[in-house]
Amino acid sequence: GMTADPTPEATVPTDPQARLEAALPAALERLRTTPGAYAALWCGSAARGEGNAHSDLDFHVLVGGDDRWRANYVVDGVPVEAFHNPLRKVRAMFAAGQGDTITMYAEGRPVWPHPDLDALIAEARALHAAGPEARPLGQQARFRLVEEVMDARALAGSGRSEEHTSELQSH
């Protein structure tokens, strides 16, 4: 049989999820040296354990001050995308019903913990549980919704809405 047992240290992981996780410590080290940063949440497909060949490492980073910015770089051959926001800007995004941000905070994994981050995660989970308006639409659902809106507009344009037809029938 196959007796060759390569040592894990010598091999670069070929499994996409393993490769993403292997780059995590170096990515985190880079985040920790970012001026003003004090907490980080790992989010996206890799954080859910569903990383594929096209996945990157996604982070939401809490920073002091008023500035918000996005950073993209490569660590250990893995692309990293980091969204840096002050606490109140994240809360403003929650209040505005930004589903993508709410989902990321609700499902993310704190890799650089802080009480502010714990509070945001709790708030996001409550919003996420509160109802579909707090959640982003998937691609399929978005297409279906657009089609329904187009159909409704076409009906309205032709002057026969469904309520109108049922009204005529009832009289």
Image (tube, grey):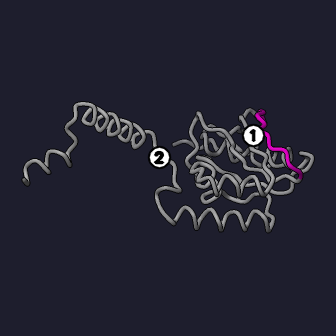
Q: What residue sits 27% from the left and 31% below the top?
A: 157
Q: What residue sits 79% from the left and 40% below the top?
A: 69
The amino acid type of the residue labelled 1 equals Ala
The amino acid type of the residue labelled 2 equals Leu
Q: Please rate how many residues cluster around mark 2, counting C-alpha atoms within 10 Å: few if below 14, some from 14 to 19, many from 20.
A: some
Q: Position of residue 57 (x, y in %)?
A: 69, 42
Asked if residue 143 is positioned above or below residue 43 in the image, the reply reads above
Q: CA distance from mark 1 to mark 2?
A: 42 Å
Q: What residue sits 71% from the left and 45% below the top?
A: 7
- Give the secondary structure at mark 2: loop
Please give left or right for residue 70 compared with residue 138 in the image.
right
- Please tell me whether mark 1 or mark 2 is closer to you in this view: 2
Return the disc, 1 or 2, that comes first in the chain's sequence.
1
Q: Which residues are magenta?
A: 65-74
Which quadrant holds residue 79?
A: top right
| Main SS class of the magenta portion in the image | strand
Q: Residue 1: say if magenta.
A: no
Please name whichever residue, 131 or 51, is drawn nearer the observer in this view of the structure. Answer: 131
Please name whichever residue, 85 or 44, is drawn nearer the observer in this view of the structure. Answer: 85
Q: Which residue is mark 1?
A: 10
Please give left or right for residue 170 compared with residue 119 in the image.
left
Q: Which residue is mark 2?
A: 137
Please give left or right for residue 83 compared with residue 54 in the image.
right
